[in-house]
Amino acid sequence: MISDSSNEVKTSSSSKSILSAAYSRLIRAIRELNLFSDNPFWSPVLNFDEQVLSTRLFLILISISLLGVIGYASLTVRTHDVTLNKFSISDFERLEARYSSTINVPCTEVSIPFNKFLDLSPQFHQVCLSPFVRKKWISSLFLVNATSHNILDFRTFAFSHYRSLRLLCHLARQAVKDTHRTFNSTHLVNRNTFSRALFNEVASVLSNYLQQNVLTNEKRTASVLSMIIAQNRLFSALRTNYYIKSVPGSKRYVTYHGVYLEVNGTNESTCDCLLKGNQCIYPAGAFYNWTLPELGEAAKNDPPPLFQVSN
């Protein structure tokens, strides 16, 4: 029994010695790890300690690089292409919401007219649908002696104003009709399907562009017509912008410009139709007792009218 115990103690002691020696050799090998060869080429450059430190630095850097590559590879998103030949709108919206950055749905028709997906119904001002632009009402305003009234009298130009209003409504309808026809014949070209949000944005931009285009064209037309009338000095038959007076005893005539008081201005503040391009404005009224205007002077509303039409 004593002999067996002593053998076990010796065996255990020898095993510990072997493990301790192996551990010591491993630690020493790690401490003295040197990847540099014994080639004399390195001897004059680095000594042994420097070679060991360089080896450790190299191993640390290579380990960091490997960890970075492994981390990047594990975080990389892999895309798998899945093709659906048939799907509904709800399927498309569900997939578009989930894979908004990768979904690709080519259109079977890359060009489509605007009127296939936009239905525009223009609405005009109520005055263009009222009796005030009908011939019966306008004809009732015609006066043979219209120029015998005060130049500020509403009866002088009521007939021409309502005719102009009728013409303006007609031009507005025709302009909208022409622009609408051009709009409907224009095509939207796109290779891929729009999302609902993008489609709504495109539709809003197109409708706003149509409205702005109509307004811009109408303003341009009105500006050109006004400039033509002003620059060519077209005389109004109602003598509201120019009027002519013959010189007694001769064949000469003198032309006077229409002059009006400025709105909310003083008696000294006037507007000359020639200088303002026929853009002088002043509230009209109904004058039943009035004095003849002085030629070349601003039209007076004295005595005041029974009622006045303001803007």
Image (cartoon, rainbow, N blue to C red):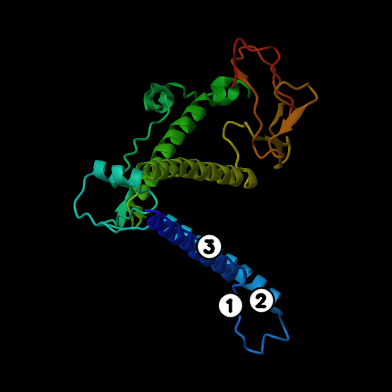
Q: Nearer the viewer, residue 170 or 245?
A: 170
**Disc 3 or 2, which lies upstream in sequence?**
3
- For label 2, the crowd category at 10 Å Cα-Cα, with few meaning under 14, some 14 to 19 and many 20 or more, is many
In this view, the residue farthest toward the left is 86
| Residue at the image point whose x is 75% and y is 22% from the top | 265
Q: Which residue position is annotated with label 2? A: 51
Question: In terms of image quadrants, where is residue 187?
Answer: bottom left
Q: Which residue position is annotated with label 1? A: 35
- For label 3, the crowd category at 10 Å Cα-Cα, with few meaning under 14, some 14 to 19 and many 20 or more, is few
**Residue 158: x percent and y percent?**
52, 24
The kind of residue on which mark 1 rests is Leu
In this view, the residue farthest toward the right is 268
**Disc 1 or 3, which lies upstream in sequence?**
3
**Residue 282: x percent and y percent?**
65, 24
User: In the rendered picture of this protein, how many numbered marks are placed on residues?
Assistant: 3
- The local secondary structure at tag 2 comes to helix
Residue contact at pointers 2 and 1, CB within 8 angstroms: yes
The kind of residue on which mark 2 rests is Gln
| Residue at the image point whose x is 58% and y is 31% from the top | 238
The kind of residue on which mark 3 rests is Ser
Alpha-carbon span between mark 3 and mark 2:
27 Å
Query: Relative to 55, is 254 on the left or the right?
Result: right
Position of residue 44 relative to residue 208, above or below, is below
Position of residue 303 relative to residue 13, above or below, is above
Q: Nearer the viewer, residue 1 or 64?
A: 1
